[in-house]
Amino acid sequence: MTENSWLGVFPELSSCVLEIQQYDIVTRANTPWRSIQPGNQPWPCRNNSCRRGGFRFTSFIQEMVDAGLKTKDGTVFCHGRERIGGSYRDCVRNVGVRCTVEYKGTIS
């Protein structure tokens, strides 16, 4: 995946930096903010009980583009299901997200 993969999904953008922060249930603390590789594939969920999960950031960025925002902080929830006993429930994991974009044809 290349650094400009988000730009293929959002052709109106000239740059997109996406950072995430996850809560570590072992240390009971947030992980440091880290930039993630762009693209429209889900970011893996770290919950071992989660099935078909992950974090999708495309709609988060789409909301920014629709509103004309250059920066946005928020939370994205895992879209998977976790097994609890003999049944499944929505995965409860989430990540903090902060995103900065630049639009084509604008002066920084």
Image (cartoon, rainbow, N blue to C red):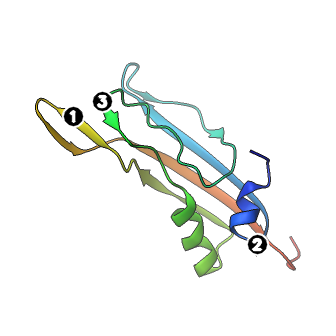
Quadrant location of the N terminus? top right
> Mark 3: which secondary structure?
loop
Coordinates of residue 40 in the picture (x, y in percent): 61, 55
Q: Which residue occupies 47% across, 48% down? A: 55
> Mark 1: which secondary structure?
strand
Q: Is residue 34 above or below residue 103?
A: above
**What residue is shown with label 2?**
11
74 relative position to 88: left or right: right
Would you say the residues marked 1 and 2 are in contact, meaning their CB atoms lie under 8 Å apart? no
Using the rendered view, name the quadrant where residue 107 is placed: bottom right
> Mark 2: which secondary structure?
loop
Amino acid bearing label 3: Ser
Distance between the Cα atoms at labels 1 and 2?
A: 39 Å
Q: How many residues crowd mark 3 within 10 Å: few (<14), some (14–19), many (20+)?
A: some
- Residue 83 is marked as 1
Coordinates of residue 102 in the picture (x, y in percent): 78, 68
50 relative position to 34: left or right: left
Would you say the residues marked 3 and 1 are in contact, meaning their CB atoms lie under 8 Å apart? yes
- Give the mark, 3 or 2, whose residue is nearer the N terminus: 2
**What residue is shown with label 3?**
49
Outermost residue, left side: 86
Amino acid bearing label 1: Arg
Distance between the Cα atoms at labels 3 and 1?
A: 6 Å
Q: Which residue occupies 63% across, 46% down? A: 19
- Give the mark, 1 or 2, whose residue is nearer the N terminus: 2
